[in-house]
Image: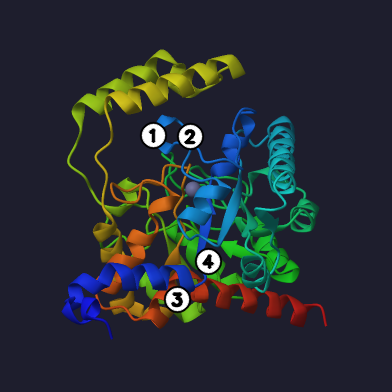
Amino acid sequence: MSLMTTCQSAEERLPGKAAKIHHEVLTLDSHVDTPLLLFNESYDIGKRNDPRRRGGKLDFPRMADGGLDAAFFAVFVGQGPGTPEGYGTALNRALTLFEMIHRAINDHPDQAELALSPDDAPRIRAAGKRAIYIGVENGYPLGDDISHLKTFYDLGGRYLGLSHTRNNQLCDSSTDREGEKHGGLSEFGREVVRELNRLGMMVDVTHISDNAFYDVLEVSLAPVIASHSNARAICDHPRNLDDDMLRALAENGGVVQLCILSAYVKDMEPNHERDSAFAELRQRYNNFQDLSDEEMELVRLEWNETDELYPARLATVADLVDHVDHIVQLIGIDHVGIGTDFDGGGALADCFDVTELGNITFELLRRGYSRKEIEKIWSGNFFRVFREVEAMAARLSE
Ligand SMILES: [Zn+2]
């Protein structure tokens, strides 16, 4: 042992030890909205972009820099009207997003590869590349035709988030201002959960109402995931899971993947200047409803300018790990993971983009989590569920 290491205290050795663990364990982020950046044709996901200069939070080189081996790219479709036209538009958008993700991967074959099953991530990592999985966020684009699920599966989709921030034809959302519509899952929603089980796609309970959550647990034959949700006991938001829900999730064998979107991590002090600037923007652009593509582009530009002028106060990695501690104390180490929601709002003061993910590992180690436990959090728990979902599908097809 060198003089150098013998002189270092345990505390001084921590960063090096954390960096080593972060590099060695397989890391997975179960939810990023980065595909939305691909609509901008000048965005090159194969190059390092500056996250503070509108560059987004993630690209393939920065995934490597940040030691992130695998990520679920979201095919996200916002909620619209439940009409044939609305469903048609939503389906087209979902298919476009699948196509853009495939193209982003195919354009950078030396950096990334499409991943479809749990074994793909370690294999792709060993080849020095990033494993890119696909998850669908919002069942809205299914319309009333369940056969689109198989299409999504065939295109590489491996989970479906049943709703987004508003109720849809599958179930109620946790944040619809108009309250509940179905009282949980609709009959179609139940069919969708059964079909997901049959296909071997994970059911994602993020965003759905508490009643819908319990309905899903009743209907699903396989464990479920919450791809980007937190603990309500630590941050009281309807979109987070309360302790009873967390216990039920553990009973189900599922996993909650913690989101780093500051507002769901910690209740921050109000920031009036920022709030009124955004309120003004919202008002000037008709609450962001019924805007043309050109107007939407203007909104994006002004949004970014406002964001730079009045930066958000952000929660920290320590605040995030408070959620880990709470969940582990409540239901053990086997049901928690990470799903950042980068480029969907995910950012902490000290985890602002994918290059800073190692800070989470550092904080976990500092609080006494072992390497084995950190590995479970970074991917082991999620892949256990993924494998069980695949195994159930195989059993159902016998
Ligand atoms: Zn979301």
Secondary structure beneath label 4 = strand
Tag 2 residue: 55
Q: Is mark 3 within 8 Å of ligand 1?
A: no
Report the Cα–Cα distance between label 2 and label 1. 7 Å
Q: Residue at x 74, y 35 (%)?
A: 88
Disc 4 residue type (three-letter): Ile
Task: Tell me if I can see residue 61 in this picture.
Answer: yes
Residue 388 in percent (x, y) is at 63, 79
Report the Cα–Cα distance between label 4 and label 3. 17 Å
10 Å crowding of disc 1: few (<14), some (14-19), many (20+): few
In the figure, is residue 263 to the left or right of 180?
left
For the view shown, which residue lies furthest in the right direction? 398
Q: Residue at x 69, y 43 (%)?
A: 104
Secondary structure beneath label 2 = loop
Disc 3 residue type (three-letter): Glu
On residue 225, the disc is 4
Relative depth, front residue between 391 and 46: 46
In the figure, is residue 200 to the left or right of 265?
right
Q: Nearer the viewer, mark 1 or mark 4?
A: 1
Q: Quadrant of residue 178?
A: top left
Tag 3 residue: 375
